[in-house]
Amino acid sequence: MTIYEQTDAWIDAHFDEQVRFLQELIRVPTDTPPGNNAPHAARTAALLHDMGIEAEQHPVPAHEVRACGLESVTNLVVRRKYGPGRTVLLNAHGDVVPPGDGWTKDPYGGVVESGRVYGRAAAVSKCDFSTYTFATRALEAVAKPAKGSVELLFTYDEEFGGEVGPAWLLKHKIIHPDLMIAAGFSYQVITAHNGCLQMEVTVHGKMAHAAIPDSGVDAMQAAVAILNTLYAQNTLYQSITSQVEGINHPYLNVGLIEGGTNTNVVPGRVSFKLDRRMIPEENPAEVEATLRKLIQDTAATRPGVSVDVKRILLANAMRPLPGNAPLVQAIQKHGEQVFGEPIPALGTPLYTDVRIFCEAGIPGVIYGAGPRTVLESHAKRADERLELDDLRRATKVIARALHDLLAA
């Protein structure tokens, strides 16, 4: 048997243990918001300890966590040094959006049924806590590397921009790898992704009794006018195309709206939150300035209306660094062997923490356990799930790729 076949066999022999590990991770909720995620880090560290793996726990000061809109964050770093050579870091995030409605399975049950594991973060991205941990264990058990290092990084603020996760750890020089791989969500190797701008818009009018509406200023009607202006942009965005394969055009979504006090009261305040995805070719400052002007100009056409616009999040697009070639080549080579089909390298309309590493000059790609396409996983939807066979195969690809990367 080749070293790769021996590694595959180790993963097969320990796969039931790997699935149980993932189930335990799913069973500790990490809804973000509210973002009380330190308990999950503590549980993960305990599970790793039971495997003989010690994780450094790096709690972020409470005031910094609150400033990002979260309640608690403890980042975990596992360092496995084998000898001189490059350090390859594997990063997955444990924070998730709340489950929402429509589930037929317990979102925090980790139920295994018909070859799938169900639960919030089963596919994005607690699965890759499991992928990366067991790939590293397989590498050590079989290949016994004598060069380089592997670091596992488990963070808890990807949904809120990564500022108290990877960015905080890089700022404090706790990590500085040579190459990195981040949690994936499909068969492809992702080398670029969209940027994301999130804003909160608050429209102020004047409350009044619904029987005498002329005595007030209807913030809802003004908000509707602003929303119509914003939604009209989506038609214009379709004419702006990206040159990155896998990314089409910019788009805008309004995901949350609230306002008013009662059905018989003219609403005096309405707020909504928007999400603007930016293709890699766009300038984030120009995008934000344009949106602010559209909002302010539309509000100005409504007498008595004022508007506040606050930026919630700005995540730059990920642009590939030339140094990512060893990562892409290793994953494509072993992905094709394990999956039996070519593994393309392309972009995605999602955004991730990898951009933070690339901005620091650290080449990175996105790859981990996931289905053929992200839609198949039900990520951020009811009944999120992961095919266990995809988990097994992705773990083999990562273990094989690590062997090549460290030996090079």
Image (cartoon, rainbow, N blue to C red):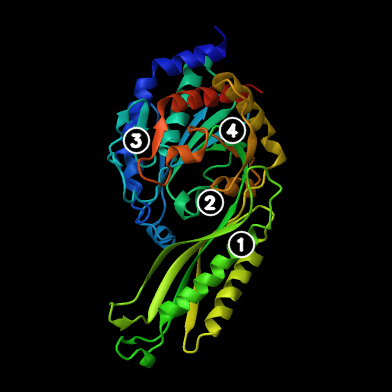
Circles 4 and 1 in contact, beta carbons < 8 Å: no
Q: Which residue is mark 3?
A: 118
Q: Would residue 397 be seen by someone viewing this image from the given angle?
A: yes
Q: Earlier in the sequence, mark 4 or mark 1?
A: 4
Residue 367 is drawn in which quadrant? Answer: top right
Residue furthest out toward the top: 1
Please name the amino acid that badge 4 sits on: Thr
Cα–Cα gap, marks 4 and 3: 33 Å
Label 1 SS:
helix
Circles 4 and 3 in contact, beta carbons < 8 Å: no
Q: Earlier in the sequence, mark 4 or mark 2?
A: 4
Q: Is the residue marked by circle 4 packed among few (<14), some (14-19), or many (20+) residues within 10 Å?
A: many
The mark found on residue 167 in the picture is 2
Nearest to viewer (mark 2 / mark 1): 1
Q: Residue at x 51, y 20 (%)?
A: 139
Q: Where is residue 209 drawn, in percent x and y?
A: 30, 88
The mark found on residue 235 in the picture is 1
Cα–Cα gap, marks 1 and 3: 36 Å
Label 4 SS:
strand
Nearest to viewer (mark 3 / mark 2): 3
